Amino acid sequence: MHGLIMDRALRIIDILRHAKRNFPKVEIISETLEGFRHRYTYADAYARTARLAGALTRLGAQPGDRIGTLAFNTYRHFELYFATAGSGTVCHTINPRLFTEQLVYIINHAEDRWLFVDVCFTGLIESIAPQLNTIEAIVFLADRQHMPTTTLPNVLCYEELLDDEADDFDWLDIDERTASGLCYTSGTTGHPKGALYSNRGIVLHSMAFGAPDCISLSMRDVIMPVVPMFHVNAWGSPFAAPMFGARLVLPGPKMLDGPTLHSLINEEGVTVSLGVPTIWMALMQYLRDNGGDLEPMDRAIIGGSACPPALMDAFRGYGVRVRHAWGMTETSPLGVLNTPRPEFTDWPVERQREMDTRTGHGVFGMEMKIVDENNNELPWDGEKFGALKVRGPWVCSSYYKGEHSSAFDEPGWFATGDVATIDSYGFVQITDRTKDLIKSGGEWISSIDLENVAVGFDGVAEAAVISIGHPKWGERPLLVVVPEPGATIDKTALLEHYHDKVAKWWIPDAVEFVDEIPHTATGKISKLRLRERFKDYRWS
């Protein structure tokens, strides 16, 4: 017997239709490439999104076609998110920070028919255009006045495309499992692989995103994603904001600019923001150098890599709560988020702070387990650690076009490549990436824990720990440090800082100072490139 409930598909475009009806005057604010701050409402965004859907249809876009974007966090990119989903096409967000060989590969692999591009990427597109096999036209996200001078053929102006279209569109009655978005992994080994999202998955992900013990988003919030819309849908915030009626602030090309972020937070009343540690460290450096506060801001969601306790403490000093999060391209990306449980309030402050550093608890819809090397499930006791596997309605079941990966070897589960413990409260602690663990004398050492201790030492701007071969122990940890500008760090004092914070045999054997630590295209520390740099390192 089935329940007598209407069978209505979960569609992304209905999120924006909901916002148009229920939050028509709520604003979307964007920093633009043209140099000014753009404002309009969800009602305005809906009308322009309908125009864009009409323009895509006029261009000849068919359901299932992939439409590439090379763009920052702006209102035009927001419109592309919804117009593509509503017209049954697939928004393929492309990370411009990838190597050109990777860009060419993923555009050709996705078989994109059109590219919608911010004008600042004109030179990049010109350099790779001859290698792109399926692109019919380049659409620059600009009005006629700001169109670039280019030698590219088949160039179109975004605003002119919209001019001749109507403010409403006969949205397709698509199946909720219809593909909506495509995002490729950063491809640190081998070719990047595509995660293909669905309307259903994104709508369910958005519902979970706004839940009280997750991001806790409401119409009283102003949310600013400082994670790029070109990677994993800016963690889902452009979909969740209109669903819950939150004001949306988009920093455009200024995501790494401390003064702009500071002014947006204070002038637009940002209450919640999302970003990787590197971004927030830059903002904290700006505040230390120039003064100021973060008075409107209530919480910062930090993911992408482990949040150093020192960064959490810095935010506390400005009255901002840090919520640690974890996710992946393959999980859309929400996986776990750290929200303290009520019983924690009676614990000593130091124990509460230790819990704050944990990666977080699962949200409904995300099922997790940790397994040993024989795929036997391990207990949630906070001690035993193993490979983390997940499954759920917004987790990829395979890669686009059936690209093989051992991550899907166990049917119905995705092997994340992370090593974790899970305690009796359901709190996950990511101890490392499988490939970054250090095995010394037959025992495992977490590079993440060592990095967090180093960042808490005065004068350390950034730190990374990699394994180096050792004649006696097999591997030993090498600490690589970027000092703060003008800082002088004593190596001996830095290593002594580890005493009573980690096991004695975990303490790195040496420290190397560098001007810069390499990062991946998504802002994470590139251990691969660091290991290559220090491949000939010899212990003294």
Image: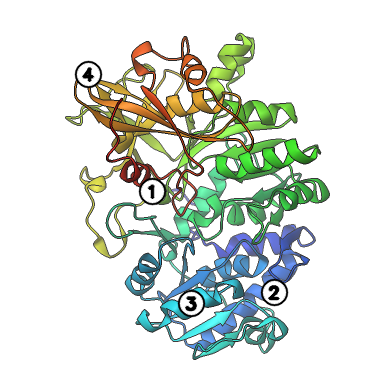
Three-letter amino acid code of the residue under disc 4: Gly
Q: Is residue 161 left or right of residue 515?
A: right
Please give the residue where the numbered disc 3 appears in the rendered image.
125
Of tags 1 and 4, the one toward the viewer is 4
How many neighbours does mark 3 have within 10 angstroms: few (below 14), some (14-19), or many (20 or more)?
many
Q: Regarding mark 3 in the picture, which secondary structure is present there?
A: helix
User: Going 68% across and 57% down the picture, which residue do you hit?
Assistant: 251
Q: Regarding mark 2 in the picture, which secondary structure is present there?
A: helix
Please give the residue where the numbered disc 4 appears in the rendered image.
441
Q: Using the rendered view, name the quadrant where residue 484 is placed.
A: top right
Three-letter amino acid code of the residue under disc 3: Ile
Whether residue 383 is visible, yes or no, is: yes
Residue 395 numbered tag:
1
Residue 47 numbered tag:
2
Location of residue 499 in the rendering, given as x and y in whole percent from the top left corner = 46, 11
Location of residue 175 in the rendering, given as x and y in whole percent from the top left corner = 43, 66
Report the number of numbered marks.
4
Pick whichever of labels 2 and 4 is earlier in the sequence. Answer: 2
Pick whichever of labels 1 and 4 is earlier in the sequence. Answer: 1
